[in-house]
Image: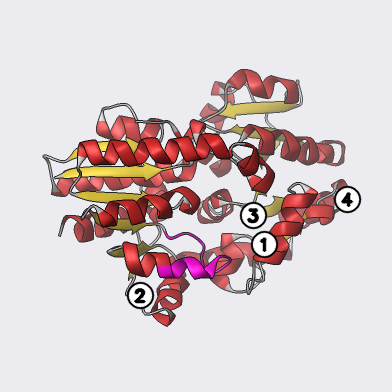
Amino acid sequence: MKYYIIAGEASGDLHASNLMKSLLKKDPTADFRFWGGDLMAAAAQNSPVKHYKELAFMGFLEVAKNLNTILRNIRFCKEDIKKYRPDVLILVDYPGFNLRIAEFAKNLGIRVVYYISPQLWAWKEGRVETVKKHVDDMLVILPFEKEFYARHEVDAHFVGHPLLDAISGLPEPDGNKFREEHDLNDKEIIALLPGSREQEVSKMLNLMLSVRPDFPDYQLVIAGAPGLSESFYEQFTDKDVHFVSNKTYDLLRCSAAALVTSGTATLETALLNVPEVVCYRGSRISYEIGKRLIKNIKYISLVNLIMDREVVTELIQNELNTENMTRELSAILSGPRRANMLKDYSLLREKLGGSGASDCAASIIVK
């Protein structure tokens, strides 16, 4: 069969690539055309129609400034789908773009599958009507999402969380080898995960690095995003601050704790059993707009949302400052807060079920 897949961000690239591998196992003649990144390209042994680096715009202001580019991409995508005529269109999160494409494809008679639901339970709940009309199969990865869709008379499939696929079966890390390969010293590591977009990373790293004087017995190591060049990070590194490229999982598994920008990485960090502090600061305008639009959710991190209670501390906007980061990091580096967080991580994994999300999703799609 012919599959057209659209992922607009780094996390979507990861999950879509694993889905493609599972699709190939069940449909060895699968032909892929896709928007995504390097991981999808490796799975398909082909280049993306467009790389997600051309698509990722963060915040209301950035979207507004790049609106013409976004609309151009939508028009191009529609024409490309018409030419390719896939058997199925698979949309991976990225709702502002993908929901428009869903309507277009459905009107062409193409079967539409949505893998990894947009966070409609947090905001723009009215978009559920678009899902009802134009999506044939909604495959969700968070247990409460199935219940959310059921309330709106959508029979969504809970397939499990694909991050469990991504981390299951990883070999035990060799800490000494990792340190040697990346020129790290013997001090314990605090990992810094500042996000994946240049604008976001610059802002978050300057904040995260402000804790350095308070932790002289630790080394700070930045996890580089796959879409950003190593040269970009040079402005933040020196003899006491190190950088690791495309080795985030290895870095986390060798770390004592982490400062993590809100997003998929908060869940990855928890599933890899690393105590963390969740950090977020957007532009004032974007934050104020978002605060008014986002309803009925108490937390911003996936860890707390899934557990429906505060497992990891969230430092948001003005609360994200040196004093608070230092206090919260100190609390999870040792002592009862650390022990309790690690216990909660075990419960989190139970809630998400076992591995196999990619295979389950692929089975539904091929069927």
Say which element carries label 4. Answer: helix
Which mark sits nearer the N-terminus, 2 or 4?
A: 2
Tell me the residue at 41%/74% (across/down): 149
Dominant secondary-structure state across the stretch colored magenta: loop
Residue 243: tell me if it is visible.
yes
Q: How far separated are the C-alphas under marks 1 and 3? A: 8 Å
Measured from the top left, where is residue 58 in percent x and y?
A: 62, 43
In the rendered view, tell whether residue 283 sits above or below residue 311.
above
Give amino acid for label 4: Glu
Magenta segment, which residues? 117-129
**Residue 303 painted magenta:** no
Cβ atoms at labels 1 and 3 below 8 Å apart = yes
Which mark sits nearer the N-terminus, 1 or 4?
A: 1
Q: Is residue 46 left or right of residue 27?
A: right
Tell me the residue at 61%/43% (across/down): 63
Depth check: 248 or 133 in front?
133
Depth check: 153 or 14 in front?
153
Give amino acid for label 2: Val
Measured from the top left, where is residue 320 in percent x and y?
A: 80, 51
Foreground mark, 3 or 2? 2
Residue designated by label 2: 154
| Label placed on residue 275 | 3
**Residue 124 painted magenta:** yes
Badge 2 crowding class, 10 Å Cα cut-off, few under 14, some 14 to 19, many 20 or more, is: some
Residue designated by label 1: 312
Looking at the rendering, which quadrant does residue 187 occupy?
Answer: top right
